[in-house]
Amino acid sequence: RIKRKVKCIDGEVPVRVEFMPRFDYGRGRTELSYINRGILAQNGVMRGTLVSTKDFIIDDELGLASTEFNLQSGRFTYLVFRYNTGSVDLKKDDEDHHNDDMRRTLNLWQEWTKKTDTPNMTILPSIWQEQIDRSALLLKILFFEPVGTIAAAPTTSLPEWIGGVRNWDYRYTWIRDSSYAFKALFGIGHTVEAEEYLNWLVTVCATSKPSELQIMYGLRGERELPEEILTHLDGYQGSKPVRIGNGAADQRQWDIYGSVFDVAYNLHTITGNTISVKRWAVLQGIADHVVTIWGEPDEGIWEVRGGADHFLYSKIMCWVALDRAVKMAEEMDLTGDIETWKRERDAIYHQIMTRGWSEEKQSFTQALDSEHLDAVILLMPTTGIIEGDDPKMISTIRAIQRELGRGEDGTLLLRYDAEDGLPGEEGAFLLTSFWLVDALVLAGEVDEARQIFERLLSYANHVGLYAEEMDPNTLEFLGNFPQAYTHIGLINSALMLARHGVGLTTDE
């Protein structure tokens, strides 16, 4: 149910309410009719009820119910929409019940927010703490209980460039998000959600062969996510097509295996708990699978639609999978084909360091034997495959800033500079700017990292939320909104800065 409380703070205010529901993405016809204390909306088997003490007038042609009234100082009214019901429950639709709901809701969120904490929180400026709280609240809102999944965003088809075709459905949960989300939730003290997410992840892995593990799932664990274009909808500011479902679910993306292992290893490191025989059997199977596939091309983290390639980040995360498998086996005295894992891990490393480095660009590149750059390579030091202050890593950071940086100060970054099989352009990808912050911290450039981080904080909207992307020229949001990825990046960058003693300055 959705509840709206309309209250007059002072004086007198005229209020107009319009109720114009559309089921099934506006397909079919939604009929409105009067019922006791409300309006019934129905389209086939889908139905919902608007509950109100006000008298509405129905316009059948427009499919619209509306009302007008005045509110005096201190007075209020509730408007409640109940989905999947055609009746009014008088016991649950009186003023006292709604007031009690409001109090309980506020109390729940306030108590949950109090649990947000980090070991270094006390050195952080108040605006950082407020933004961490806001980002944590968003992750909780996008957390789907009791399954334990996290939606990437609650929207579909908000364009990555106005008028463009890069419009995707993000109302699903991605495997790769697991390691980033896990670090963020655990880092700010929300261990319950982190563990529920991990339990879901392990369950998915345990019920699928490694070769059948998908990159993404429905929030209830659905595997079938067919992509469909809704031709009858114009899209945001005329940006077509509008899509539901996501065809990327069928892609091969090898980085997911490293994400699973990174979460498992970090949990072991943080908690010190031993791993169960059943869980290790699952992970062992994944490590063995990585041995067989790491040399094959895939579609990569950005889910390109121009064909598979030997993307460097996919190789890096395959290295992560085998590296963590070896460490877990040796540290916890677990069985497995450790010598093979070590041999293949070292072979991956050799390819990354030779074929993934461009002498011309003086940078690690998007793919093996390529001259294109990719902002995801900024994550290399966080995986442990290279030190953050390694000369090659520092050179890569500067190359990415120089070639992918946008905006007046270069704080905003494009994801990559290669063709991806789609026409048109896109905005700057906000998460990559937080990756830049992390990379600069690990490179020892903490002052520059802090400056960029605080600039990024200024890009939040009036309630502290971020979209997926931003127009580097106008600083307007682009892409689906609000975006979990961006807020996860913000939290992890704040934690990174705090761990390296970056917080309050002497004049604060």
Image: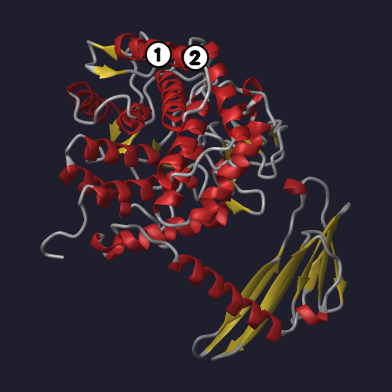
Q: Residue at x 49, y 71 (%)?
A: 110
Distance between mark 2 and mark 1 Cα atoms: 8 Å
Query: Where is residue 99 shown, x and y percent of the image?
Result: 64, 82
Residue 69 at x, y = what percent? 66, 83
Location of mark 1 (residue): 348
Q: Relative to the observer, which residue lies in front, 437 or 238?
A: 437
State the image coordinates of residue 310 (x, y, percent, origin top left).
45, 13
The quarter of the picture where the C terminus appears is: bottom left
Classify mark 1: residues with Cα within 10 Å, few (<14), some (14-19) or many (20+).
many
The answer to which quarter of the image holds residue 437 is top left
Q: Mark 1 is on which residue type?
A: Ile
Asked whether residue 501 appears in the rendered view, the answer is yes
Residue at (20% x, 52% y) in the render: 502
Residue 302 visible to the viewer: no
Left or right: residue 433 compared with residue 230 = left
Proximity of marks 2 and 1: CB atoms separated by less than 8 Å = yes
Disc number for residue 294: 2
